[in-house]
Amino acid sequence: MGLSKDSTISSLQDLYGTEFTAADVRAWCNMNDCAYQTVTNKLTDYKVGRGKWNLNVTEKLEQTYQAPTAIPAVEQNLIPAKDDTFVSFGNFSDIKKIIKSGLFYPTFITGLSGNGKTFSVEQACAHLGRELIRVNITIETDEDDLIGGFRLVNGATVWHNGPVIEALQRGAVLLLDEIDLASNKILCLQSILEGNGVFLKKIGQFVRPSAGFNVIATANTKGKGSDDGRFIGTNVLNEAFLERFPVTFEQEYPTAATEQKILVRIAASVGKHDEDFCKRLTDWADIIRKTFYDGGIEEIISTRRLVHIVRAYGIFNDKAKAIQVCVNRFDDETKQAFLELYDKVDADFVMPIDTEVPF
């Protein structure tokens, strides 16, 4: 007997109500000369457990999802603000060209920590007036975090778009920050990285990418893990996932001249016009980096840490203290070596001495 899906469901409901078990379905199949697998395939949308079905489940979800007042739409401007201290360098012009083209062209940016990978993407969008949605990836990030899922709102179960769907629909740039911290759950983005949109299976809706949508990922590694242990928590990413990024940019630290320009702007923003101090900081960092690349030390001073030092100088009005509190994150031996090296770079520098601070 070839009953339709609606006829099958209606017949089951007449006999057993809205909730029934595998035993009920088998009994119905015997009465109607139907295959058990054929019938259960028609009940997929209503399955609530092993050998259990509830005809009210899908109906409830559809009704709450369609409620227009469940999650009111909020108009918001997602274009990043321009930062007056920003100085372009490295791959900035290439990143800007990709975003400006409006073409879908997933881009992978790799480089050591604190060298402006994320900041450059944000400022490229700011200069082009493009919306940016940034997602910080962790090992716990899953499909629900990225694509979306059902949420309880005012006692009703409603669908809530994740950041990926928001970016798709708005034609925004999706920035996946620290992508190499992800687990294999990130593979839910495979079809999106092909530019084909995504089918939201939980609500039966296909979302196509709007014009201008693009994906940019940043990472400290190339998705192959960290052999030296510097970036604990990074994972080996699926090769098929990495292949969906046509280009990879290797971001280096800025040159000493560019870095000095950055620090001078930061210093001015905190009321400190001290070009000499900024130059000595960049010279100091340059020596440390060269030693690091030669294998002489295991730590490095990033551009971000130099910015921290300049801002600390603006707060404490004390260069020695600014440097000390910002290198305290390193182990005692490394911290002492960094302080002694700066002492050689800056003849006016006085090594900080820990003292009791009166209340």
Image (spheres, rainbow, N blue to C red):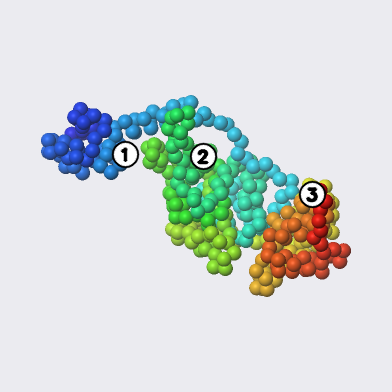
Say whether residue 216 is visible: no
Q: What residue type is disc 3 on?
A: Ile
In the displayed structure, does residue 200 sit left or right of residue 298? left
Residue under label 1, please give it. Answer: 48
Residue ID at (76%, 62%): 282
- Secondary-structure class at tag 1: strand
Expressed as whole percent of the image width and height from the top left, the position of residue 323 reads: 77, 59
Residue 230 at x, y percent in the picture: 59, 64
Q: Label 2, secondary structure: give it.
A: helix
Alpha carbon of mark 2 to alpha carbon of mark 3: how far? 39 Å
Residue 257 vertical position relative to residue 24 in the rendered view, above or below: below
Which residue has dot 2 on it?
166
45 to 234, vertically: above or below: above
Determine which residue is flagged by label 3.
315
Image position, residue 341 (x, y; %): 78, 68
Res 47 quadrant in image: top left
Mark 3 neighbour class, 10 Å CA radius: few under 14, some 14 to 19, many 20 or more: few
Q: Give the amino acid type for the residue marked by disc 2 in the picture.
A: Glu
At x 46% / y 36%, what residue is drawn? 151
Residue located 57% across and 31% down the image: 75
Distance CA(mark 3)–CA(mark 1): 59 Å
First in sequence: mark 2 vs mark 3: 2
Q: Relative to the observer, which residue lies in front, 338 or 80?
A: 338
Which residue sits at x=23%, y=32%?
9
Task: Give how far across and how far down residue 38 sits, in percent.
Answer: 20, 42
Front: mark 2 or 1? 1
For the question of whether residue 56 can be seen, the reply is yes
Q: Badge 2, how many Cα within 10 Å: few under 14, some, many 20+?
A: some
Q: Amino acid at mark 1?
A: Val
Secondary element at image label 3: helix
Mark 2 → mark 1, Cα distance in angstroms: 29 Å
> Does 266 sit above or below residue 279?
above
